Image: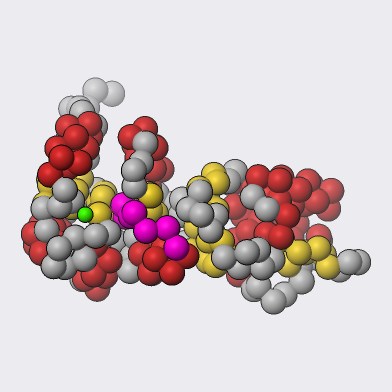
Amino acid sequence: MSTPKDPLPRLLYVEDEDQTAAIVTEMLSDEYLVDHARTGEAGLELALGRRYDVMVVDRRLPGLEGAELLSAVRTAHITTPAIMLTALGTVEDRVSGLDAGADDYLLKPFDFDELRARLRALRRGRGPGSRREIGDWLFSSESLALYAPDGGRIPLTQAEGDLLELLTSSPEHVFSREEIVASAFPGGSAGSVDALVHYVRRKSTPEIIDTVRARGYRSGMPR
Ligand code: CA
């Protein structure tokens, strides 16, 4: 079946630093129709005025801040996926950015290919999910990743993400292996749960998941 070539997806990019904006706009232009706004106010006006497929928002903007912009966009029930660019790496900053309505964030300076990859992942759409704190770490089911306290991003496989989604859904609860299999991996085995726990710990930190002897596993409290 021949269909007309799809138009490029439309991307809203809010960035006040002219030099960065010029480079990023140029780089994104072969994959997206980029609308660039230099202030939070201008970005908000664009976001409210037309439909975008994805948004890239700088955290630090003069006047209306990136987090305030996203918060206003979400209040208007606009669910366009958004990545926040931030130079700030503390857990509070990241949580507030994600709480404001960002689906993912990227620490500045960022690798351009990384931005492209994140945008594609967001546009594939993992649907509404959750961003949860695990001690000083963050887990995002949308972007299928763990974020370390230093801002490092650790990609997860779908199975690893499903495991953390389950454990963090009830952080105080000790999940037996059987319970984990039944809820997250129908048809799987207790041994495959142990292997997954091992992989997640190895790629992040051993404290990310607690072993409760003779009972099972629970969401950890890593620092
Ligand atoms: Ca800025």
Residue 168 in the image: above or below residue 146:
below
Residue 68 in the image: above or below residue 162:
below
Residue 140 percent coordinates (x, y): 50, 57
Q: Nearer the viewer, residue 117 or 159?
A: 117
The residue lying at 71 percent from left, 60 percent from top is 207
Q: Nearer the viewer, residue 4 or 222?
A: 222
Q: Is residue 89 found inside the magenta-colored segment of the image?
A: yes
Q: Is residue 124 found inside the magenta-colored segment of the image?
A: no
The residue lying at 39 percent from left, 54 percent from top is 104
Query: Most extreme residue toward the bottom, as rendered?
Result: 172
Figure disc tally = 0
Q: Is residue 179 left or right of residue 48?
A: right
Q: Is residue 78 left or right of residue 172?
A: left
Q: How is the image coloured?
A: secondary structure
Residue 184 percent coordinates (x, y): 67, 57
Residue 45 percent coordinates (x, y): 9, 62
Q: Is residue 195 left or right of residue 133?
A: right
The residue lying at 22 percent from left, 37 percent from top is 24
Q: Nearer the viewer, residue 83 or 5?
A: 83
**Residue 87 visible to an observer of this rendering:** yes
Q: Quadrant of the N terminus?
A: top left
Query: Most extreme residue toward the right, as rendered?
Result: 214
Look at the image and give the residue range highlighted in magenta.
84-90
Which quarter of the frame holds ligand 1? bottom left
Residue 165 percent coordinates (x, y): 60, 61
Q: Quadrant of the C terminus?
A: bottom right
The residue lying at 38 percent from left, 69 percent from top is 96
Q: Nearer the viewer, residue 209 or 4?
A: 209
